[in-house]
Each structure stands twice: as C-alpha cells, then as structure tokens.
Image (cartoon, helix red, strand yellow):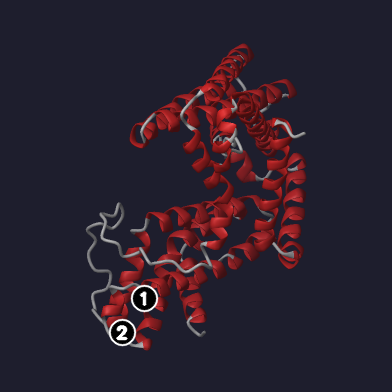
Amino acid sequence: MIDARKLFRRRLISEWRFQYRVWKMAVDWTVALYIVIPALLVAGYQYVSWWGDMPGWGRAVPETAWLIVLYISCGLGSLRLFLEEADQLFLLRNAEWMRRLKGSGLGYSLSVRVFLSLIAVGFLSPFLVQVHGYGTFRLVLLAALTVAAGAHMLLANRIIALRLSRFLGWFASAGAFIVLGIMFVIAGRAEAAWLWAAAWTALLAVSTWFLAKMRLTMSHTFYQDVAYESDQRMKFAALLMGQVVPKPSKILKRTKPLVLSNSRTLFRKRTPDRVLAETIFKSFFRSGTQVRLYVQFTLACSFGLMLMPVAVKWLFWLGVSLPLAYWVKMYGKEVQGAAFVKLFPWRDEDRAKAIRKATPLLFVPAYALAGLALGWSAYGLLAGIALIPAGWVIGYVMGELFNAW
C-alpha cells in the first residue's frame, strides 16, 4: 500500500534518474575522462596546496569579499515540492497526503541547501583560516550562519514570488537580499562578537521555521507550484536542448535595449561586410540573454584562472578561446539567418568577412578581463595589463581560423 512518504521517494528517485540521463547527454565517458576527471584532480590538488602555501592573490582578497561570495552562494538552489498536474485528481482533495508530500519536498530542499552551504564554507576555509585568522569555533559558527541564511532565503524568495506580483516581488526580494547580506557580512567577520553571530543565526533559524510552516499551510498555489516544479525539473534539459532544437530567431526583435541603445556606427567606411559585422556586434550586446551568458562566462573564466597553477593558467586561457570563437560564429550565423537581414542580398564573401570582423570585437571584453586575471594572479598587475591587448590578437586569429570552415 503506497502512502505519501513512498510517493515522495518514488518521485525523488524518478527525478534523480531523469537528471542523470540529462547530464549523461552532455558528459559522456570521453568528456568525463579527458575534461571532468582531470579538472577535478587539478582542483583537488590546488585546494590542498592552499592549506600549505597560500598564493599572493589569495592574501590580497579582503575578508569582506569572501563573505560576499559566501552569501551569494546561499541564494543558489530551488524549493522543490514534487507536485505534478495529475495530483489534482486525488491529492488535491486529500489534505493530509498533500501536507506530507510538501513537507517531504521541503525537507529535501533544505537538506540540499545545508549540504551546498557547507561545501561553500569548506571551499573558502583555506582563505578564511590561513589569511584572516578564523579559528575552528569561528568557522563552525560561520557555517551555521551560512546554513541559516541559505534556508531562510530559499523559503522567503518562494513565498514572495507566490504572494506578490512580479514587479513588487522583485523589489521585495532585492531589498531583503541586500539587508540580509549586510547583516551576514557584519556578523560573519572574524572580529565580530561570537554572541552577535550566534544571535543572528538563531533569529534566522526561528524565522526559517515560521516560513516553513507558512509555506506548508499556503492554499490556492497548486497550479503555480506545478508550473514551478516543471520549470525546475526541465531547466538543465532546456539548457542542453536549446542548443540543438531549432527555434524562431528573436535577436532582432524591436525592443528598447539597455546597452548600445543610441550608439553610432562602429566603422567609418561603410561596406557590406562592415555593416553586417556591426549588426552582429550590436545585436549581441543588446540581447539580455547573450549579455547575461557572456558576463557569466567571463567571470567564471577569470575566477578559474586565478585559482589554477601557473602552467595550467596559460593552457586554460588559450583553450577557452575555442568555445568563445565558436559561440561568436554561431551567433553571427543566427544574425545572418534573421528575417530582416535576409531582406538584403548579402554575398557569401561579405558574410564570412563580417564574422571575421565581429569576432575580435566580441573577444575583447571577455579576454581583457581574463588576461588581466591571468597576469595579475601569476606575475603581478603590470603583467595583467600587458596581457589585455592579447585578446584582440587572439580574437583576430580565431576569427580567421573559424571562417576557414
């Protein structure tokens, strides 16, 4: 006889199997063997080395910066209740089953949040202990504060999204995030009184308990919860399938952009290939999706370069130019396939030249920051500044290389 607990376990196992199949599509055995496993080994070796010999850049990062990074990591994750559309046929009428299923999902989500918070604290421990003098007791207290803050945000953000409109909810979430962040940084510092940190941790724990009770007793949110569950279940699959499933182009949609809204021409000489290259460049930085992914890619690469050994830094820095150049080329082809661009009789030669000219322009922002991170962390600030122009050269070379096929 199945009950609510067994139903939850069945859905949880189904969720794990589904996500495993999704990730297996992207990470097959060759990718795992040649990329994932070596990267994990290098990361593990680097982490152990930080405990014995802290690099110069690690000593230069202030304590507040690490606490901000730790706090931002608290906001990762989602609140899963494992509801499905078919539940409206039976579970919606059975309040006890619904409450137990929601409670199990909430407990699972909070457990994942606790695990991720502890992983984040463990990752930053070498910097906090070796550089900023955190002792064992202080580190445990910071871990408890991180867990409490993460659990509180997990519940609060979801309740705000259910109770307020999208516009008001965004402002409420942003305000709460800033206020809680200030409190987190003040209470988490090594010189802060331990009683102060413990009091804030206890306050957040009590608040989390009340928010959990509120979430379990909220009514008339079934359809919103089901839609949210579907989005969370499919978010990684959508990310992967979005690269292979054809969809209508929206890159030249007539909307008011936040970036380059009133920009002038980029090239003095107006030739077909330059006009098309300018169109590729402007549409890229006027697209909120592309800019968000571009910023995430740039920050991830720059942060990774700061953490790697010197020999690996150079290989990684040159290696990321390949996916970046391929990204630029594919986006350029998408622009060229837009309905508006097809209205003009572009020659194949102009199309190839346009991507070749647009590649260095799109390379420079990402590679400038990545080159600065590489040179600064390995040899000093002057070396980092000297590597900034290399982004243009590598962008030009990659543009020529990828236009050969």
- Earlier along the polypeptide chain: callout 1 or callout 2? 1
In this view, the residue in front, 25 or 93, is 93
Q: In x, y percent, where is residue 142? A: 65, 25
**Which residue corresponds to mark 2?**
346
Amino acid type of the residue that numbered disc 2 sits on in the rendered structure: Trp
Residue ID at (51%, 79%): 402
In this view, the residue in front, 145 or 115, is 115
Residue ID at (26%, 60%): 254
Label 1–label 2 contact, CB within 8 A: yes
- How much space separates mark 1 and mark 2, taking CA atoms? 9 Å
Question: SS for tag 2?
Answer: loop
Residue 88 quadrant: top right
Q: In x, y percent, where is residue 21? A: 69, 57
Res 336 label: 1
Q: Is residue 73 visible?
A: no
Left or right placement of residue 3 versus residue 390 in this view: right
Q: In x, y percent, where is residue 231? A: 52, 47
Question: SS for tag 1?
Answer: helix
Res 368 label: none
Left or right placement of residue 38 versus residue 159 in this view: right
Q: In x, y percent, where is residue 193? A: 60, 14
Q: Is residue 180 visible?
A: yes
